[in-house]
Image (spheres, rainbow, N blue to C red):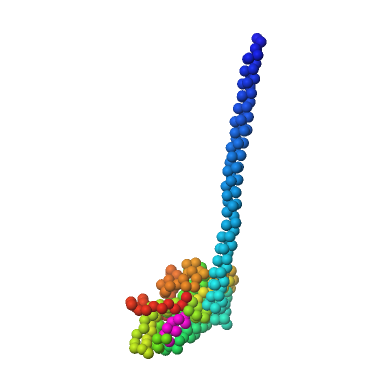
Amino acid sequence: MKLGRFAILMIGIMIFVSASAWGYFLYYMPNMKEVGMLNDNKTANDAEAAKMPQAKKRVEKAKQMIDVKAAAWQKYVETRTPGMSLKEHGVDLSVNPWQLAVDTPKFRNDIQRAVNEQVKKGGVKVLTSPLVQRLDPNLPVNQILSTFYNYPALKFPVLVFDFGTITVQGTYKQIMDNVKAYTKMPHYLAVTDGLRLDGTSPLLTGTYNLSVVGFIRTKKIAPAVPEGGAAATTSFGGMGGPPAGMGGPGAAGGRGGMRPPGAPSIGGGGGGAPTAGATTPKGGD
């Protein structure tokens, strides 16, 4: 049977349409969708790239803020923390526990001398002075870190002394100078609160609560050892910034915020809440 021209034309048209549809659905349409997705992605990337200069500025500003805070804290590290040896009014925690048992009482005595000197500032007469608790001679050497240095109850060794109520006598100026002097106590951060003045001028009696914190600088801490064993020193992070949860200088507003949960109290004195109605100049950081 011979096909006519019209039939041949229709068959050609159908073959062309089929081939075109096959090419469109198999190649053209997916490719165009991919192109659209790539264009959308490019547009999004261009928008993010446009934000890059601002992001870089924010990063630089954050670095500057960190450097400023670190520099400010470093000033406290240099002057308001104990040294890293007994000769520097501090202690070396990298020694083995047996040596630490010998050094800690000496360090405790150095702290007591520092507190005794500080409490007399301003020329006041000290009626009730702070007492740094002595180390129990029967305390196992492996418990010295946890008892005296609050480690590992905290992630870093720190002294926390809650001395309770201190009583001094002097003129108004002497007592105020005494309280303010704690803001510059060498090697330690001190906080006073609840100041109360009694008596008749010019001789007054001042009472206040005193807490002292000492951040121990160290890069290594010797681990616990069995009796008669040898201690191998392990690495420790040292003291690069304000403690978590402690903030930095000025973070502790009073005695209650200075002792970590579960950490033992090392200071002497009973202490008590500030007397109602008493004036409360803040001394310390």
State the residue at coordinates (53%, 75%).
Answer: 76
Q: Position of residue 92 (x, y in %)?
A: 56, 77
For residue 234, which quarter of the picture? bottom right
Which residue occupies the foreground of this view, 116 or 109?
Answer: 116
Q: Which residues are magenta?
A: 174-182
Give the overall secondary structure of the magenta segment.
Answer: helix
Outermost residue toward the top in this view: 1
Outermost residue toward the left in this view: 276
In the rendered picture of this protein, how many numbered marks are placed on residues?
Answer: 0
State the residue at coordinates (42%, 74%).
Answer: 254
Q: Is residue 58 left or right of residue 246?
A: right
On the rendered image, what quadrant is the N terminus found in? top right
For residue 273, which quarter of the picture? bottom left
State the residue at coordinates (56%, 60%).
Answer: 58
Q: Is residue 82 magenta?
A: no
Q: Position of residue 51 (x, y in %)?
A: 57, 54
Residue 266 in view, yes or no: no
Q: Is residue 176 magenta?
A: yes
Q: Position of residue 56 (x, y in %)?
A: 59, 58
Which residue occupies the foreground of this view, 260 or 142?
Answer: 260
